[in-house]
Image (cartoon, rainbow, N blue to C red):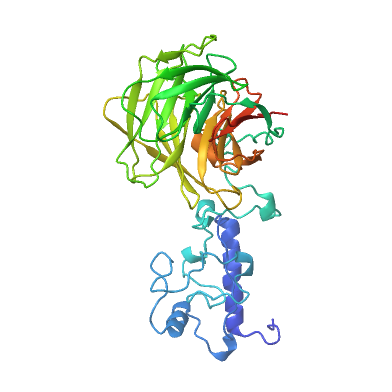
Amino acid sequence: MSRPSGECPRHRAGRRRLLASVLCVSAFGCGEATLTVVPGPDLDAGTPDDAEAGTDARSGGDTDHDDDGDRVDGAPDDDGVDEETADEGAPEDAGTDGAIVDEGDAGLPSDSDVEPPPDARIPADGAIDPPDGATDAEIEPPDAAIAPPDAAVDPPDAAPLPPCPEYDAPTVTGLVAAPEIQEASGIVESRRNPGVMWTHNDSGGTSRVFAFNTAGETLGIYELGGARPRDWEDLAVGPGPDPNLTYLYMGDIGDNFSRRDNLSVRRFAEPRVVAAPEPPTVQVEGVEIFTLVYPDGAHNSETIMVDSRTGDLYIVVKSGDGVSPVFRAAAPLSAEGVIELEHVADLQFGPAPLRGSANTTAGDISPSGDAILIRTYSSVYLWRRGPNATIAQAFGTEPCPMPAARERQGEAICFAEDGSGYYTVSEGPNPPLNFYERL
């Protein structure tokens, strides 16, 4: 029988080896094997039939694989090459340039030609080849539906804040009548005595506070005793050691030249105010004095606030450049020793979004704890506070510009006790008490 035209004995030997490999798959169950056929040299040109000889000839005696078939000696890694496109310009392994490698053992395929088990096909980056007919987009990565721990748990104030509240333009409820009040530097509405306001004088004032009603009429003078304050600047009302009482906090915190080694806050239970034909002068008992220091040196401050939820005390720095650090003294406060304040936030007054005067002069936290007010000589801003947010976190939210009366030297602000609005007052004799009703 004549051989086909152009088929030499070497071609016939190759066909026999191919047939032997196919029989191996059928007879010996070599179902896991993959016969790799790659372009070989021209067999009619006298290329040696020995695959190893061909390998040595091409590599110059060196090898790019170790005994396990892995690349070594800095050879390029084939791991990322798609099997379906490996012959489209991809580099060929040094030992597979022959048409079919003959191992010499009954035509069994070599280890290098055996397809690795499924696990071995997972690349180093963890990606898994899609099954036949599926695209990458249709294959969900392992555990894709399993969220990381706590991924479904919202942070404390993930819910959006309510819109900025709206307040009416200021209306004057009365003029502060007491001739002793010449520099009203702080103001709060009493929590114990509805409709009663508390205020005090600025630097030079003695240790006393004044009670008056919203019409400006004096209701009493309350003497605290003790050393004369260096620079009264603000007061606040909030919780204290007895949960059945509310307390006034007087801030001796002014320091125009930033030279003080420490500052002080006085706390006492709110006195009972009783209307009388002549305003009484009352001696206050049980006054505590807290000594505080900043962690980074002296500051001038005119704002103290007490968190109605936690009892923590806050001080906001006043500076000419508008940079106003916020410091906290965590409750419970102790009159023993010195309390080092904690720096918890920074505010920048003057440029947007806190436009206007750069000098902070007063602040207050609402009775429910859901809002914070801070004023400057020209402006008022409000921060909304979620149910689980700290004061520091609230200062990280967008501030709300509020109405502000044109006052001679506005240095006092407070919320109304019933949440119906807020008040401001200025220094000077017989200053007007301005009320801003919530709409």
Looking at the picture, how far across and down is residue 164, in whole percent? 67, 36
Above/below status of 12 relative to 334: below
Looking at the picture, how far across and down is residue 439, in whole percent? 73, 29
Above/below status of 257 relative to 228: below
Residue 227 lies left or right of residue 32; in this view the side is: left
Q: Is residue 138 visible?
A: yes
Query: In the picture, residue 17 is in which quadrant?
Result: bottom right
Farthest-out residue, left: 337
Query: In the picture, residue 266 is in which quadrant?
Result: top left
Above/below status of 40 relative to 313: below
> Looking at the image, which residue is at 49% across and 33% down?
183
Residues 319 and 65: in front is: 319
Above/below status of 376 relative to 227: below
Residues 347 and 287: in front is: 287
Residues 364 and 407: in front is: 407
Looking at the picture, how far across and down is residue 179, in whole percent? 51, 26
> Looking at the image, which residue is at 58% across and 57% down?
27
Query: In the picture, residue 32 is in which quadrant?
Result: bottom right
